[in-house]
Image: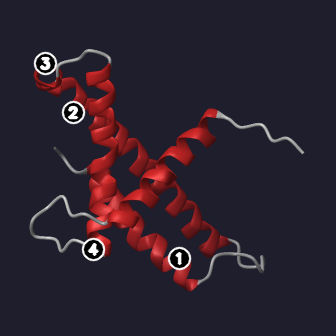
Amino acid sequence: MRQNHTMFDAIGAFFGQLWRTANFWRISPLGEVRTGSKLAGGLLFLVMPFGVAGVVLVAFGFDLDRVDRWLDAQGGWLDAVGTLAFRVLLGFILLICGALILGWLFDRKNPDRPGWGTALGALIVGYFCAMSVFAPL
């Protein structure tokens, strides 16, 4: 049977291959981390997508110094967009935590309602999300 593959499957396969490669070699990008450790593999995985992006940019004729200067010039609005996206994500997590806590409080007759541990975990995660969402910058 033939399966339809989407772009997301290709992206997942690409990052999966990067993960397997990084955890096979486990070469530390930092001098303080022992080469061969699991931490070295994880750090190498974090470095590899940026290395691939740099190779692609150079292959298309971009100068990495000019790209770096352009990113520095765009720093203000990029920082604002990143902060907004992070706060929206934390707000969504806060809504999920609120739904779990409300389900634990008011859905007593449902046998599938969240338990004590789920409610306590949601309360802790929700607290930290709320502090991050509503904290002044």
Q: Relative to 74, does residue 16 appear above or below in the rendering?
A: below
| For the residues bearing labels 4 and 1, Cβ distance under 8 angstroms | no
Q: Which residue is mark 4?
A: 36
Q: Nearer the viewer, mark 4 or mark 1?
A: 4
Q: Which residue is mark 3?
A: 66
| Alpha carbon distance from label 2 to label 4 | 35 Å
Left or right of 59 on screen, residue 126: right
Residue type marked 4: Gly
Helix, strand or loop for disc 3 = helix
Task: Identify the mark nearer the N-term, 2 or 1.
Answer: 2
Q: Which residue is mark 1?
A: 119
Crowding at mark 4 (Cα within 10 Å: few <14, some 14-19, many 20+): some
The picture quadrant where one finds residue 124 is: bottom left
Task: Identify the mark nearer the N-term, 3 or 2.
Answer: 3
Crowding at mark 1 (Cα within 10 Å: few <14, some 14-19, many 20+): many
**Quadrant where the N terminus is found in the figure:** top right
Task: Identify the mark nearer the N-term, 3 or 4.
Answer: 4
* Residue 83 coordinates in the image, percent (x, y): 27, 39
Crowding at mark 2 (Cα within 10 Å: few <14, some 14-19, many 20+): few
Residue type marked 2: Asp
| For the residues bearing labels 3 and 1, Cβ distance under 8 angstroms | no
Helix, strand or loop for disc 4 = loop
Task: Identify the mark nearer the N-term, 4 or 1.
Answer: 4
